[in-house]
Image (spheres, rainbow, N blue to C red):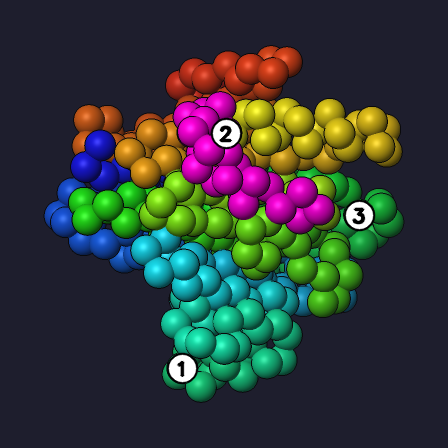
Amino acid sequence: MRWSMIATWKMSYDGVKKGTFLLKDNKSAKEAVLEAIHEVEKNENYHSVGYSGLPNEQGVVQCDAGFMDGETLQAGAVGALEDVVHAVDVAYECSKGRFNNVLVGEGANEFASSLGIKKETMLTKESYEKYLQRKKEKLPLSSYDGHDTVGMVALDQQGHLVSATSTSGLFMKKKGRIGDSPLIGSGFYCDDEAGGAAATGVGEEIMRGCLSYEAVRRMKEGMSAQQAASSTVYEWTEKMILKKGYCDAISLICMNVQGEVGIGTNIKFAFVCADENHEPQVYVAIPDGKDIILRAYDDHQDHLD
Ligand code: SD4
């Protein structure tokens, strides 16, 4: 494949479309992934990423993001970043230096300001109303809540891979809580010599298995992207069930150095992919024992963001 792109969830569709224009036009995987994630971050209809994200238990939107360049292995991330729509840009900027690649909280915010990124109120009326409603219900923190991270992997015509993530994390999380999305090797990983991966689901479950790294390692050892993704998630899920009796939601997208893609998931999961031979399309992945059933997304029966 000369170029290829894969992204988590249906909400990535418009972004992937934009990203594929860039890849077709010989632009870099970095440009394609950043542009595609921006589309999701700025869309107020998506309450799990960027602007209009759902807040933590104190009513504050704190975002996490990560970026990794498969050519240089430079990686950067931000955690608990406030008032910035495009958290992935700050993660990208963090990836450039020799030090200070991962910044959290106030330090991440100060760094964003130093880049000239203007502060914006992230909470919209709609997301605030959802917050008030949830506070009234006094429900315990739920593991998923349709709360989805945008994760992407792209291969460009120069043969370089990039992986990145952006999320507002779990709804009603504790102030300062970060998930897998800003953790290199957990929420994202990428190496031009092996492949790239990104995760969505319950960060606490994903991070203890360093699952993005694990899937990339399996591709390096010769597994196909599909085998690497599905075996990583299946084996981790089984292990967690053995250890503690349950496993929370985990979904992984993978791409190898040829641009072939793979999905691992322990829940019904939607994703978008495209390459030089296929226009962007939304698909659904359904776990079936060790296997994954893949089919086109159907608006009538699939209700996933
Ligand atoms: C987190 N992994 O903060 C993110 C949330 C997510 O689908 O992806 N939900 O744990």
Structural crowding at the residue carrying mark 2, measured as other residues with C-alpha within 10 Å and reported as few (<14), some (14–19) or many (≥20):
many
The mark closer to the camera, 3 or 1, is 1
- Residue holding disc 3: 141
Stretch in magenta: 207-228
Q: Is residue 277 above or below residue 93?
A: above
Q: Is residue 246 above or below residue 200?
A: above
| Residue 237 at least partly seen | yes
Residue at 69% in and 51% down: 171
Q: Is residue 222 on the magenta stretch?
A: yes
Element at label 2? helix
Is tag 3's residue or tag 2's residue first in the polypeptide sequence? 3
Structural crowding at the residue carrying mark 1, measured as other residues with C-alpha within 10 Å and reported as few (<14), some (14–19) or many (≥20):
few
| Residue 68 quadrant | bottom left
- Residue holding disc 2: 228
- Residue holding disc 1: 115
Residue at 52% in and 77% down: 100
